Amino acid sequence: MMLARDTLFILRAPFEDAVLEGKWFCAACATMEGALLANPHWATHIDVKRMPFPRPRHEMIVLIGEENQSMPVLVLADGAKPPPDAKQFEGRYYLDEPKPIARYLAATYGGAGPHP
């Protein structure tokens, strides 16, 4: 599957968990939502996919494998220069922690990055 733009996968909030009672949000995904609010221009350069909570998450599996369905995750576009901390699945690079994702987006598309 070709990927023309960097793609950020985050959990759509709120969500329900079949195991735990109540409504929830993912704290790491909420951090990414905040980074997107601070840098609205990122949304013009990347695709943002807000995904439902239940697995399997087929769109992610096709890109980075069944074992890599946790969010947030930024899957780098084909031909993108991966940072040194990027992970790899079958030749495709991705970042799966909020700070490295935000650092990459700020370095690549400008704007505010995470405070150390």
Image: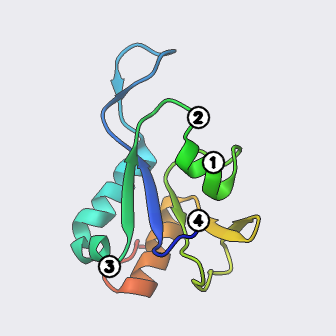
Would you say residue 116 is visible in this rendering? no
Mark 2 falls on what kind of element? loop
Q: Which disc number belongs to residue 80?
A: none
Q: Earlier in the sequence, mark 2 or mark 3?
A: 2
Q: Confirm or deny contact between disc 2 and disc 1 (CB under 8 A).
A: yes
Mark 3 vs mark 1, foreground winner is: 1
- Marks 3/4 in contact by CB < 8 Å: the verdict is no
Quadrant in the rendering for residue 21: top left
Q: Quadrant of residue 48?
A: bottom left
Residue bearing mark 1: 61
Q: Is residue 76 above or below residue 28?
A: below
Spot occupied by residue 54 in the image (x, y as percentages of width and height): 50, 29
Q: Which mark is residue 95?
A: 4
Label 3 residue SS = loop
Q: Residues within 10 Å of mark 3 (few under 14, many from 20)?
A: some
Whether residue 24 is visible: yes
Helix, strand or loop for disc 1 = helix
Dot 4 surroundings within 10 Å: few (below 14), some, or many (20 or more)? many
**Image point (27%, 75%), residue name:** 44
In-front residue for pair 99/108 = 108
Specify which label sits upstream in the sequence, 4 or 2: 2
Could you tell me if the residues under marks 1 and 4 are in contact, i.e. CB atoms within 8 Å? no
**The residue under label 2 is which amino acid type?**
Pro
Q: Residue at x 62, y 81 (%)?
A: 83
Residue at numbered disc 3: 112
Instruction: From the viewer's perspective, tell me whether residue 82 is left or right of residue 24.
Output: right
Residue 56's mark?
2
